Image (spheres, rainbow, N blue to C red):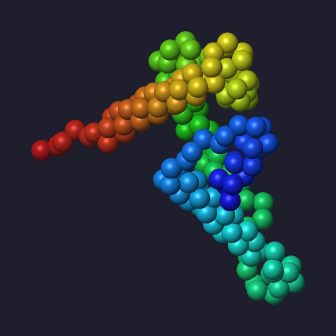
Amino acid sequence: MIDRDRQLRAQARGTLAPARDAQEILTELWRIEEANAHKFYRTDRKWSSNISYEQLAESGLQFAVGTESPDAIVSRQLDAETKSRLVQYLVAARRTLTSRQQEVITLMYEHHLTQAQTARKLNISRAAVSKTHHKALAALRDNLASTMLEKLALKTSRPISG
């Protein structure tokens, strides 16, 4: 059918359609079959529309309403002194970043810009922003982890009394 369509289009233009080998035709048919199967399975997932709100209410399932963000949970459980220390560690870790990494972090987290907006502001590609952002976060993570391990080691080290 596809080959016939190409032949008809070529005939309408007054040219001959290029000959195609069997493997090329089979590959194209396979792609069409895969696309059709994918469409079938995607439309098969509309099961949730078959349940009414009344049936859902009668099922007795409890849904979380107004759940807190992970940041809010952690923030609530930390005291002011610990928060202050964590901010100090983060500021110290941020100073170890390159100037470009600091710019990207500042624009994305303090000015709430997207990667595309940050790229436009810095006149670099979005891919460069993504790579710089990724490396900056990895560096911050490593620096904070080593700082926290050092602090933990200092806290737990006690002189051995004999």
Residue pushed farthest left?
A: 162
Where 83 sits versus 70, above or below? Answer: above
Quarter that holds the C terminus: top left
Camera-nearest residue between 81 and 91: 91
Position of residue 29 measured from the top left corner of the image (x, y, whole percent): 59, 59
Q: Is residue 41 visible?
A: yes
Q: How many marks?
A: 0
Residue at 51% x, 50% y: name it: 21
Residue drawn at (58%, 18%), measured in percent from left and top? 102
Residue 48, placed above or below residue 151: below
Q: Quadrant of residue 80?
A: top right
Camera-nearest residue between 23 and 55: 23
Q: Is 3 rendered above or below residue 33?
A: above
Q: Could you say which is closer to the camera, residue 114 or residue 36?
A: 36
**Could you say where residue 141 lies in the image, as x and y percent from the top left?**
47, 34
Residue at 67% x, 12% y: name it.
123
Left or right of 91? Residue 154 is left
Could you say where residue 47 lies in the image, as x and y percent from the top left?
74, 76
Residue 27 in view (yes/no): no
- 82 left or right of 156? right
Residue 98 percent location from the top left of the image: 50, 14
